[in-house]
Image (cartoon, rainbow, N blue to C red):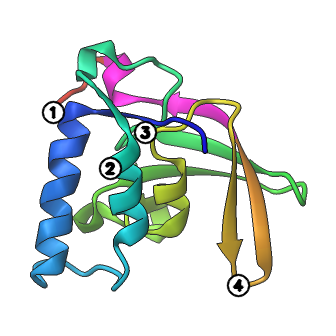
Amino acid sequence: MKDIIISSLDMARLRTQIEKARSGGINAPINLNPLINELDRAKVLPPEKMPPDVVTMNSIVKLDYLNSNKTMQIEIVYPRQADTAKQKISIFAPVATAMLGYRKGDIIKLEVPGGLAELRIADIVYQPEAAGDLDV
């Protein structure tokens, strides 16, 4: 399993979101274990030390589907900001959880209704830490 990196700010905010979800405070899937497991194994860095090629919260990421010619661009957001029409995907969604902490060029495998999808993180169009936007 590949090592992942999370900023200390994202870690604190995500732990708060998980607690809210557990208490019924926000709309969330029943199974938060994949996200919890990723956070538990992550290397934590201060936001200002985050490499610019790592997917963090509020990053805009271009993905290539390896088993088709499809590409998509999504923004990984907190649940209250999710809006699929604007390609803003909640961190509680499996695709967002699977990408968090990975780097540009990494390949992620994801169970989808049609089987197994393989996606490559083709580009990180925007990363808040690299842009100096730590309050998003």
Q: Are marks 3 and 4 in contact (CB under 8 Å)?
A: no
Disc 2 designates what residue?
40
The disc placed on residue 95 is none
Please identify the quarter of the rendering in which residue 10 is found: top left
Q: Quadrant of the N terminus?
A: top right
Q: Position of residue 36 (x, y in %)?
A: 33, 61
Please identify the quarter of the rendering in which residue 32 is found: bottom left
Graded by Cα atoms within 10 Å as few (under 14), some (14 to 19) or many (20 or more), the crowding at tag 4 reads few
Residue 45 vs residue 62: left or right? left
Residue at point 13%, 68% (across, down): 19
Q: Element under label 2?
A: helix
Disc 3 designates what residue?
59
Q: CA distance from mark 3 to mark 4?
A: 25 Å
Q: Is residue 90 visible?
A: no
Q: Residue furthest top?
A: 49
84 vs 120: above or below: below
Q: Earlier in the sequence, mark 1 or mark 2?
A: 2
Residue at point 64%, 32% (across, down): 123
Q: CA distance from mark 1 to mark 3?
A: 13 Å
Q: The disc labelled 2 sits on which kind of residue?
A: Asp
Q: CA distance from mark 1 to mark 4?
A: 36 Å
Residue at point 77%, 70% (across, down): 116
Q: The disc labelled 3 sits on which kind of residue?
A: Ser
Q: CA distance from mark 3 to mark 2?
A: 21 Å
Q: The disc labelled 1 sits on which kind of residue?
A: Asp
Of the two numbered discs 3 and 2 in the rendering, the one whose residue sits closer to the viewer: 2
Disc 4 designates what residue?
113
Disc 1 designates what residue?
135
Q: Are marks 4 and 2 in contact (CB under 8 Å)?
A: no
Residue extent of the magenta highlight: 121-131
Of the two numbered discs 3 and 4 in the rendering, the one whose residue sits closer to the viewer: 4
